[in-house]
Image (tube, coloured by chain):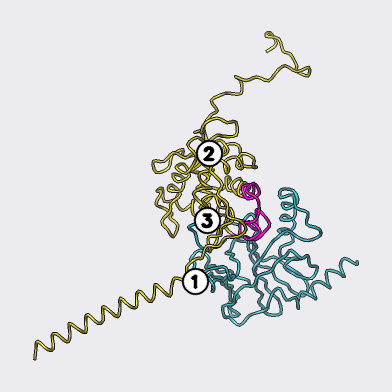
Amino acid sequence: MSRLLMTAFVLMLSGVAGAVHAQSDGAWQTMTLSDFREPSQTDPLQTMVWPDAIRDANAYATRELKKNLNGRNAWVTALSTRFEDKGRSIILSTVLTRTCESGANHAGAGVERSICPLRIVTLDRGKATTLREDRGCYIDPPDAGLPAQNQGDSIQARFDPATGQIQMRAIIGGQLIAECARSFPTR
Amino acid sequence: MRTILSDTLKMSFRMNRFIRACLLVCTLFFALPASAQRTQFCERTNYSAQEITDAVNASVLRDDLKSTSCTLGGLGRFESGGNKGIFNGSCCTGIFQLNTANVRRYADTNREGYACMSLQEQVDAWARLTNDGYNTPAVRRLMEMGTFDGQRVDAGFIASCIQLGPGNCQQMVSSGRCSGFADPNGTTICDMANAARSNSDPNCREGNNSQVCDMGPGDFPTTPVAANPPAPSANDIVVGPGQI
């Protein structure tokens, strides 16, 4: 019973959690970065969208990397955005894990996308449902150490309220990356 | 009158060319800061191919790739010149130039933290990445093929495929040609495999102090297991010739 109450409380809080922003005006929005190293019982990304990815990364860090996590999580990061649609919230997220296919490891290489696990999860009256599991692009938001041409790099998404379609795209070095252009129905 | 007009037009044309040339130089000049700036984190090192090979042999790398660990020492020299603290300014850090995503996934740290790790810790992270990459469709297909675009698919080739990214490697495999994938500088996976071989120490010692081993995936060991039977043990079940 107390677990049920806790879950309901978490779902209520998820409506105001800052990690996932609600945007539904049809414009392209940059997906925001979440760092899961600090465990959270209120972040829907940690509790409902990627709990298994965090568990796997923690197991790998302790078993293979011989790390003592001291109650924290391994370094898992995710990109996400949230849309509101007819009384429900839709979370779109990609997560950087060992199952991602990342780019080159090479002195002559530049910034490249990773292709990672993607989930679309709906929150409707406190109930979380995974609408879709797929693969989608991931890049870290640019930092000051990267070249000027990469300072505008981003993964973006938009939601069409008329059709319920989510579109994703990636801009790296000022170029649209063709393989990152995806479209997902949500109805 | 016609001559004056013609001279004026010629002068105007020359001016346009001069202005365009100036514009090109200015564009290149102002574009320079946009290019990647290499950064040195922690100490600058100059590990030899043999030292990198020794670290590879002490790592968790699959045994069949360790069989050409001298080539992998050459790969480390090719990527970083033996400098484990170098960040290329855009993606990649350390002795094998791991990209930032892989640094986080396989070393649980950021590029500064990774650059300051020991040689062995860096090689261990790279070995984990390479072991995982070994099971990708591109690598499996290359191993089935045995040769690719006239090049023998040996462990150095496989490591280069993983090094440039399994997705990029798949692009090369699908094209059937070495030129099917090249990075922005024109480096192909075949180029990288050749560079790894040529950068290895000619007097390289593998883990057992032997000369460079030329065995790769799909090869059979030259000393079959049956030729080196283990010593008898008290737990052995002895079967007589007539009982087989």
The residue at 64%/80% (across/down) is: A23
- Which amino acid type corresponds to the residue marked 2 in the rendered image? Cys
Q: Which residue is mark 3?
A: A104
State left or right for residue B36 relative to residue A7: left
Say which chain is cyan: A
Which residues are the magenta region? B100-125
Between disc 3 and disc 1, whose residue precedes?
3
From the image, state whether disc 3 or disc 1 is nearer to you: 1
State left or right for residue A76 relative to residue B169: right
Horizontal and vertical percent position of residue B139: 52, 45
Q: Main secondary structure of the magenta part?
A: helix
Q: Which residue is mark 1?
A: A149
Q: Are marks 3 and 1 in contact (CB under 8 Å)?
A: no
Is B229 located above or below residue B46 in the figure? above
Q: Secondary structure at mark 2?
A: helix
Q: CA distance from mark 3 to mark 1?
A: 18 Å
| Residue nearer the viewer, A49 or B183 | B183
Horizontal and vertical percent position of residue B172: 44, 51
Number of numbered callouts drawn: 3
Horizontal and vertical percent position of residue B28: 39, 72
Say which chain is yellow: B
Horizontal and vertical percent position of residue B129: 61, 49
B90 in magenta: no
Q: Quadrant of the N terminus of chain A?
A: bottom right
Q: Secondary structure at mark 3?
A: loop
Q: Are marks 2 and 3 in contact (CB under 8 Å)?
A: no
Q: Which residue is mark 2?
A: B70
Q: Residue furthest right?
A: A1
- Which amino acid type corresponds to the residue marked 3 in the rendered image? Ala
Circle 3 packing at 10 Å, graded few (<14), some (14-19), many (20+), is many
